[in-house]
Image (spheres, rainbow, N blue to C red):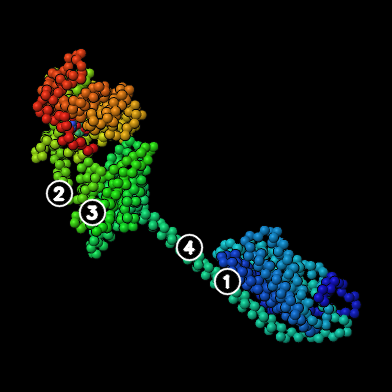
Amino acid sequence: MEWLGLQFVAELPASGQILLDCSHNPLLVLVAYLVACAASFATLDMAERVVHAEDPGSRRIWRWIGATCLAGGIWAMHFISMLAFQTPIDIQYDLGVTLFSLLIALLASWLAMHTLSEVQPSALHCLKTACVIGLGIAGMHYVGMAAMKSSATAYYQPGLFALSVLIAIGASFAALWVARYLSEGSGVAHQLLKYSAALILGAGIISMHFTGMAALDLVLPEGALAASGGDTGHLQLGLTVALIILLILGSAISAALADKKLQNKENDLRRVNALLSQLDQARMSLQQAANYDALTNLTNRRGFNQLFAEKLSQKTSEGGMLAVMFLDIDHFKRINDSLGHDAGDALLKVIAQHIKSSVRSHEDVVARFGGDEFCILISLRDREEARGMAQRIMHKMKEPIELAGRRMVMTTSIGISLFPEDGTTCEELLKHADLALYQSKGAGRNGLHFFNSSLKTRASFELQLEEELRSALRQDHALMLYYQPIFELKTGRVTKLEALIRWQHPVHGLLTPDRFIGIAENNGLIAELDNWVLRRACRDLGELSRHGCAELKIAWNCSPLNLAREELAEEIEHALHTAGVAPERLELEVTENALMGNIANTLVLLRQIRALGVSLSIDDFGTGYSSLAYLKRLPLNTLKIDRSFILDIPTATADMEIVQAIIVMAHTLHLQVVTEGVESLEQYEFLERSGCDFIQGYLLSRPVPLDELRAVLDEINQRKPVLGVNPLSLARDTFAPASLDPSLKSLAPHAGASIVRPIR
Ligand code: C2E
Ligand code: MG
Ligand code: MG
């Protein structure tokens, strides 16, 4: 078989031919091997680069550089090996065919680079590609051999020829396979693996060449003279070519190294940037958590203080006015207590939205200080602007809110202080806005107040009152109990008394509880105070027994805060025991909302108290949010209808219907009904008609001290109705203003107007 003038598989001519004796220059063979190794190393390096390059453009460039290095390397190896080939005849090379062989090398190398730069190609894929590349290399070699022009004919031994092709394929496969392991990893071991792979591949390539050369027999016709091989310049040329190709390969490897370093730097930079932005985010979320309220997403106290300080220093230097507005949601605690904290939280969110929508979004700062306390900072020109905004908020707040299946209408109390007239520091302005808020609450809530200097006096007055109350409790002086009769309609007698605390203050005179219960509650004195009342009431029960009133019961008021104390039942038992009084003569009055707080714990405590024999009464009924379901679970005896339902009877028909409904409901639950705040005969008649069990109010008597009680009771009981007399006329006869004590007459029927309801 002849291909490009080369004799493959053809038998050597039997006679008339001279077999040329050829040899190789060992130095150039070594140089060729080095070049093959360098080309292998460069190719593996480029393949690694291609795998790691992120940009498709640079991947393409590295692939071409790699292909050029491999092709150049193999071709140079071939060229140098051919220069190392020493024959006794002259050999010329055909340029066109030589360049064609280079083109084949280039194509095979490009294919090799393409597969080398794939991440983890399969074994089968490697094998297929290795066959093509191997054939390409072999093709290049034998085309290169075909470029050889001499008087001799080239014959190839088929076995060695086939072996050379197999070696080419094997070397290609080895290169592709090693590259799979080189694509990942770094460090010395990785580098060593790459060097070893380059040496093995170089050996593979050179082996292929010399196996091909071993397969070659050059034959001359007998008689033709073998001219001496002019190999004098071959060594020099071979070394020069080797130097040039090594320089090219070296530059390519250096460029790859530089690119790798650059990319590593870029990656480092990207990592640092990512870290920095993560840090930035973390810092921002920390700041968010530190300065914002998680529930409403409003600024919290800390964030507000920062903004406030900034705005204040700006206004101080540039001039201008600021308003600090404190907002407190009226009776918010009732919502929390009766509907639970989740409902309370939901309500706070809606309220926060209401407030935000009422202010100028960019200029004003709205903050939540905790609980139901909100604070707003406004830049303004005059105080009327602040008033306008406060009124807008109050108006917005009255929009009904759907919550837990109910429609609520909330109101708010607002206190305002102004910069610079009410203060020049943050602390001062906040304190003064708080004082103004306090005044709004004191004035019946749902209102707004500006700070004025007299409030300061009031605040210090309260502080002083707290001190004095502490000492009054400690020294057991100045505090006293007044008793208000509770009249039983069925028997026509006073069967119960309500114990109501009074404080005989040396300067301010007789103080009613609304002046100091709040102070006691806010300053941890309430348990002590209620305990004092309990002990005194029990002592007075003993006193009453000794004076012929052994049947009388005393109702004792207990603060909601006190109801949260587990030791309360023991304290009651102890007080009763010490005074030697039967527990049935004591009744505990607790407000509706106090019961709704922590219903589970309260239930346990109330059952303990009931187990002692003490009765339980629910006070101010109708002002809270208790449900029938709750009432059913509580071990109650009595229900006291709040005075506010009685106030406008008989003019308010709706109130009358409510009172009648409450009475029917209470009776259904087997509860007795007391109506408090009864001041007029009409109210009395209506309640009697409606089936109320007890009445309490100024119509009968105001609360009086114990030593005056005897006379009051006698007077009321003297008018005890004769059985069979019409209760209506009885009431008229018995309690007609003309028959009242002169001191009481002046109070009926609307004396209650002068009594301010306590704020709890
Ligand atoms: P409360 O338990 O609802 O007591 C009824 C209040 O209504 C009493 O006010 C009483 O004087 C007043 N009142 C009674 N009849 C009439 C009337 O016909 N017209 C008007 N306008 N008012 C009437 P007081 O004594 O000022 O007590 C106010 C509240 O202070 C009480 O409301 C009770 O909740 C609380 N309180 C009184 N004493 C104590 C106590 O010892 N401990 C605790 N924790 N709270 C107490
Ligand atoms: Mg009461
Ligand atoms: Mg009451």
Q: Residue at x 74, y 76 (%)?
A: 100
Q: Position of residue 652 (x, y in %)?
A: 25, 31
Q: Residues within 10 Å of mark 3 (few under 14, many from 20)?
A: few
Amino acid type of the residue tagged 2 in the rendering: Ser
Up the image or down, 321 lies above or below 237; here it is above
Label number found at residue 256: 1
Q: Residue at x 18, y 18 (%)?
A: 730
Residue linked to disc 4: 271
414 with respect to 408 (left or right): left
Up the image or down, 305 lies above or below 720; here it is below
Q: Residue at x 75, y 73 (%)?
A: 141
Q: N-terminal of the two: label 2 or label 1?
A: 1
Label number found at residue 454: 2
* Residue 431 at least partly seen: no
Residue 715 lies in quadrant: top left
Quadrant into which the N terminus falls: bottom right
Q: N-terminal of the two: label 1 or label 3?
A: 1
76 with respect to 360 (left or right): right
* Residue 127 at least partly seen: yes
Q: Residues within 10 Å of mark 4 (few under 14, many from 20)?
A: few
Closer to the eye: label 4 or 3 = 3
User: Element at badge 1?
Assistant: helix
Amino acid type of the residue tagged 1 in the rendering: Ala
509 with respect to 199 (left or right): left
User: Element at badge 2?
Assistant: helix
Residue 149 lies in quadrant: bottom right
Q: CA distance from mark 4 to mark 1?
A: 22 Å
Pointers 4 and 2 in contact (CB under 8 A)?
no
Residue linked to disc 3: 384
